[in-house]
Amino acid sequence: MTKLANLNFRIARLRYQMSGVQSDIRLLTNAGLDCANASMRLRRMQADLLVLIAEREVVACPA
């Protein structure tokens, strides 16, 4: 698997996982429960996603 294909796969997998965490947050919020841990996990995932997207940009468009 090429580096670009690997990055695209990791980005897609992370986006899928993020949608699950977002769903968990909605469920917790609707139930009136604390969603602090899930929201911290989502923020870390968002930061990881930005890093992966930046890496993909470097690989896809080398300077």
Image: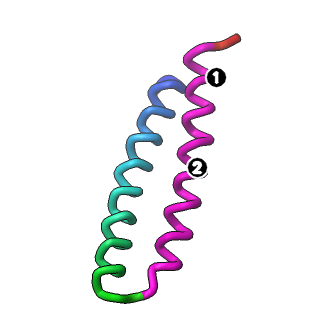
Q: Magenta stretch: dominant SS?
A: helix
Q: Secondary structure under badge 1?
A: helix
Image coordinates of residue 13 in percent, x first then y, are 39, 47
The image quarter in which residue 24 lies: bottom left
Q: Secondary structure under badge 2?
A: helix
User: Is-magenta flag for residue 48?
Assistant: yes
Q: Mark 1 points at which residue?
A: 58
| Residue nearest the observer in this picture, 37 or 3 | 37
Left or right, 58 with respect to 45, comes to right
| Residue nearest the observer in this picture, 30 or 9 | 30
Figure coloring: rainbow
Left or right, 17 with respect to 56, comes to left
User: Is-magenta flag for residue 6?
Assistant: no
Image coordinates of residue 21 in percent, x first then y, are 39, 65
Residue in view at x 70 percent, y 11 percent: 63
| Residue nearest the observer in this picture, 36 or 2 | 36
Outermost residue on the right side: it is 63
The crowd level at tag 2 (other Cα within 10 Å; few <14, some 14-19, many 20+) is some
Q: Mark 2 points at which residue?
A: 48
Left or right, 50 with respect to 13, comes to right
Q: Give, as a three-letter code, the residue at label 1.
A: Val
